[in-house]
Image (spheres, rainbow, N blue to C red):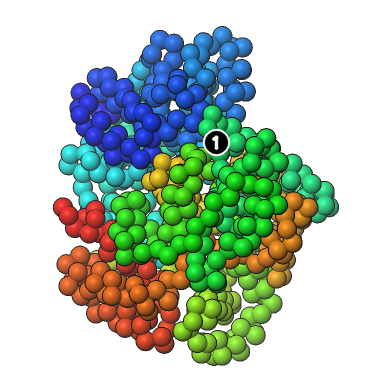
Amino acid sequence: MNGATVDEGIVENMNEALFHRGPDSGGSFVQNGVGLAARRLAIIDLSGGDQPIGNEDGTIQVVQNGEIYNYRELRAELERNGHELRTHSDTEVLVHLYEDHGPRFVDKLRGMFAIALWDGREERLVLARDRFGIKPLYYRVTDKTLSFASELKSLIRQPGFSREIDLDALEAYLAFCCIPAPLTIFKGVRKLPPGSILTWDARRPNDGIQITEYGRPRPVPAGEVRGETEDELAEELLERLRDSVRAHLIADVPVGVLLSGGLDSSTLAALASLESSAPVMTFSIGFEEKLFDERGRARLVAERYGTDHHELVVRPDAVELLPKLAQVYDEPFADPSAIPTFIVSKLAREHVKVALSGEGGDELFGGYDYYVGHLLAPRLRALAGVARPLVERLPTSSAKASTLDHKAKRFVRAAGLPAIRRHYRWKEFFSPEGRAELFRPDRRGQLDPLDILERRYAESEGSDELSRIMDVDLGIFLVDDMLVKTDRASMANSLEARVPFLDPVVAELALALPSKVKVRPFSTKRLVRNAVTRLLPKEIIEGKKQGFSIPTSRWLRGELQPFAREVLSADRIGKQGLFRPETVTKMLDTHASGRVDVSRQLWALLVFSLWHDEYVGAT
């Protein structure tokens, strides 16, 4: 969008790059200096919901990626106000809400969305992203031109696109395995942060863009937390979860559940079954390595509710999958659980277009072990100092020992630090010292990734410490790791993943809860367990969190090692020009020897090298 003539061919080419996100139809609106386009995965109003959609006189046009779950209520309100709607789609309500409320129409939306709206009367573009960042939205500003897309691979198709790497983003990637908003791997592109509206006035393009925060979920101040008993809060939580699942089941196509066997996905499968007249389809995958296999627990839930259950034992060929994922995640993305997420999404798409997924439950309700660590750390600082020499000598040759090594060593090393610095050390892939050793001296960014966490932590001042730590996860690691993983893996398979825990109805309660009803020493996600105790088998309620992980440490010492050495060869790393080849080779040798587990760091480098060859090396 630039005030000059838009090349319709370029718009169509960019849209085609996102075919996987909407293989059912595609459309565009191109007029003078404006171009909007969308691919559609038809889920609501299958015959009438093609995009773009305009208002009655066509002066306002909108495209969206996502779903609006309260569109029926909004439609009724709009019709009472005199609007005429031609379709029964959720997208059409957006243009009429904008007519009534302007850019803050997003305040009324319950859903997941990335929206682009053109107001031809005011010559104004409005971009908006949902409160939790479930759906992605990238934008690029050059001279007097603004362009945007759901994925970078669309923007890359623009003529003259610069593939200059943002070294600050690369610093953050090596620290966190993902790239936090608003950064992207490319210097000339940014992500619109969650809960934000971007406006651009074509009449005054020199004024640039304006970004406004409209919805920032945050924990309540410590003095305003809910005071009811745990049983009362658990009953309320169950009703809110049931209401959210009911809303997320709205579709004109079948909806399934990605059932890992953990507490969150099992809760969704149970509630979806209670809300559905027909058996719900559930999808699980497992590994031959029992430490990483939760199929048994998933099967317990499927049998209890009589779901139409589908499962697959995964023997993933990482050599084949990793280059594919480098294409799917068009930024470097080193969360190894992207592999099983991609595979289970592919399995689900053989049967349904929509599946519920459990993202957000851990961040809102205290599901990670390191939250217990934060509670214990102040009490164990002295003990941690004594234990450190012992823990440093833990063996790491087996998968189980590797898991123990990762948790115990990281806990002990950071236990005595202030809360946010402790959290940083527990989350980081490469330490500051590790990044300094890895980077070529002339290729360092200026960003300290800790600053990203500290800024978010400062925003929740007044809430209790653990709630503030969970808010950091909610706003950074959930958005740019967990939700990126699920969105790209599912949409690459043309599957819409919906996340009922990330619903305002549920989050409003979660963010008002005292930490003690979520996490206690050696007990996580207490209130959720209490809320669903009558719905799920004992093995689920009392089971430890396992996570959707893969045996990367063993793979990189075994069948994946030759591939890793090829992708991370001194010659290849040298040509990429960012890292010291000798440091990478030393890491490969150290890990292969079994002395130290650096599989997390090697995985990040492996993913980056594959991404670089796919998106930068080819230019």
Q: How many marks on residues? A: 1
- The image quadrant where one finds the N terminus is top left
Mark 1 is surrounded, within 10 Å at the Cα level, by few (under 14), some (14 to 19) or many (20 or more) other residues, namely some
Helix, strand or loop at label 1? It is loop
Q: Which residue is drawn at 64% across and 37% down?
A: 278
- Say above or below: 520 vs 405: above
Residue 140 falls left or right of residue 111: left
In which image quadrant can residue 570 be found?
bottom left
Q: Residue at x 24, y 34 (%)?
A: 13
Residue 47 in view: yes
Residue carrying label 1: 254
Residue 530 falls left or right of residue 15: right
Residue 301 in the image, given as x and y percentages of width and height: 66, 54
Residue 258 in the image, given as x and y percentages of width and height: 55, 50
Camera-side residue: 475 or 340? 340
Residue 166 in the image, given as x and y percentages of width and height: 29, 56
Q: What residue type is labelled 1?
A: Pro
Camera-side residue: 241 or 3? 241
Q: Which residue is drawn at 31% across and 65% down?
A: 319
Residue 240 falls left or right of residue 357: right
Residue 395 in the image, given as x and y percentages of width and height: 50, 87
In which image quadrant can residue 49 be found?
top left
- Say above or below: 48 vs 138: above
Q: Which residue is drawn at 32% across and 68% down?
A: 605
Residue 31 falls left or right of residue 405: left
- Say above or below: 465 vs 25: below
In which image quadrant can residue 211 be found?
top left
Residue 433 in view: no
